Amino acid sequence: MQWYYSAAGAALGPHSADDIEHLFATGEVSADTLVWRKGFAEWTPLGDTDEFARLADAGQPPPLPPAQRQATAYGAADDVLVVDRLADDRRVDRHDARVTTSPFTAATVAPVLAGPWTRYFARSIDMIIITLLLPTALYLGLRLASPQLSAKILSLDAPAMALLLLPLAFLANAIIITLFGNSLGKALFAIRAEPNDPDRHFGWGSNIVREFRVWFQGMALYIPLLSLFTMIPAFRRVLRGAPTTYDLGRVSVRSYSQSRLRRTLGMLFALLLHVGIVALGAADSVMRFSGGPPRSDTGPSAANAGLPPTIWTNPTTQLATTIPAGWQYEPATGADGAPLHGFAHATTGRAAFFGVETADDMDMATYAAALAQGMGRTIPLGDWSMSNLPGVWMASGQLLSTDARATVYAAQAGNQFWRIVYVDQFETTPGQIAEPELTTALFRSVGVGVGG
């Protein structure tokens, strides 16, 4: 049953019966307040209705003066109702039919405490969107400062990445609230976390502290199962109109819209985000555990450590070979403008550049010496030696610019000399880069080392 009540010459609503009881308890309405619902011929005093006559008979105290209007809150010590002033004459008339509280939230009714599901879905929207955008922001920011650190962070597995992103997500949410007055999720539901003291304003410090209180006390650091022991009691407290433990005596989360359509659309949006995240996770798991069928390479795409093996055809020899899982192909260009075939592995941070040079009347020893001399300005190489693959030479060194470890493999096929230059951006100590599967696959595409 939907109810309306009269205040300042305006009809406010619709409200549920529970809302009316809450407004009576907080002094917003009294036994003399006129109310109406479908079936009433005219407006009727609250105390004269069958539904709410018991409230007037309970002997509730009269409402406090306007300067001391209160919303429901609970004491930090004994968990009983205490003063939690929502507004005074210097801020906003709670009966005003339209109040702007922030650039994100426009109130259309008098504010009431937000319900648990509304708060849950608003928080879900905030966290999902922020954690989806954070990796990109981290990559772009860290790439400018330290490409090696950027690659290391993005190569972390899912649990390690979650441990890194969660505190950053709460910090980012606090920054958004401070800059714009509200978070995206709360704005969609027209709810807002406000200080109980009307003379207090939430700044950087207050918003950051509250966000981390939510993470620690409300979400138990998002640790599976353990978080249930904090989220379920918080849900029950909010359901009965009490603040959560992390907001006790400090903050009230108030709703400035009673639109069912708005709540429904907001919850559907949050559910779609949840379904999308689950679907992406399930697809990634299937690819990782099944390995997936080999696929023809169609060009560059985003680096993905879960890539299955791929079929790659050498454009020069037209021989096909299977590139091991995790390696992503992308055409590249050498310093002299010659085309190269690039392969990158997001997890290991290694890259391989495969190229060819043609020279008549030259043996492998002469080519190896010329190659080492030509690369000396960027990668000084040590002595050449034979690798485990027949006919394939190898030498290691380090990039002069970053000290990254590098290894070169070279082999002769007729008058063509093929080389693979490996670079490991995570390693800065001298040593050999051993990638036997990729090395074998690439030289197989030129008929070297493995009998064609």
Image (tube, rainbow, N blue to C red):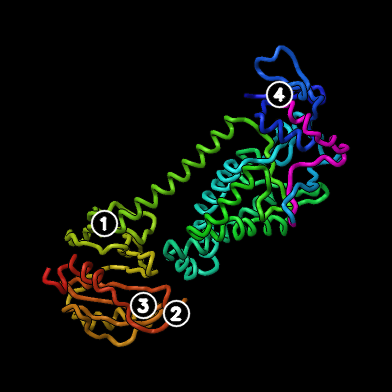
Tell me, for residue 403, which label it has, or none: 2
Residue at 71 percent across and 20 percent down: it is 36
Disc 2 crowd rating (10 Å Cα; few below 14, some 14-19, many 20+) is: some
Provide residue 353's location: percent of width, then percent of height: 32, 68
The amino acid type, in three-letter code, at marker 4 is: Tyr
Tell me, for residue 320, which label it has, or none: none
Whether residue 5 appears in this view of the structure is yes
Query: Closer to the camera, 203 or 61?
Result: 61
Mark 3 or mark 1: which is in front?
Answer: 1
Mark 2 or mark 4: which is in front?
Answer: 4
Circles 3 and 1, Cβ within 8 Å, touching? The answer is no
Pointer 1 residue: 290
Q: Quadrant of the C terminus?
A: bottom left
Query: Closer to the camera, 413 or 47?
Result: 47
The amino acid type, in three-letter code, at marker 1 is: Ser
Among numbered discs 2 and 1, the one appearing first in the sequence? 1
The amino acid type, in three-letter code, at marker 3 is: Ala
Q: How much space separates mark 3 and mark 2, taking CA atoms? A: 9 Å
Pointer 4 residue: 4
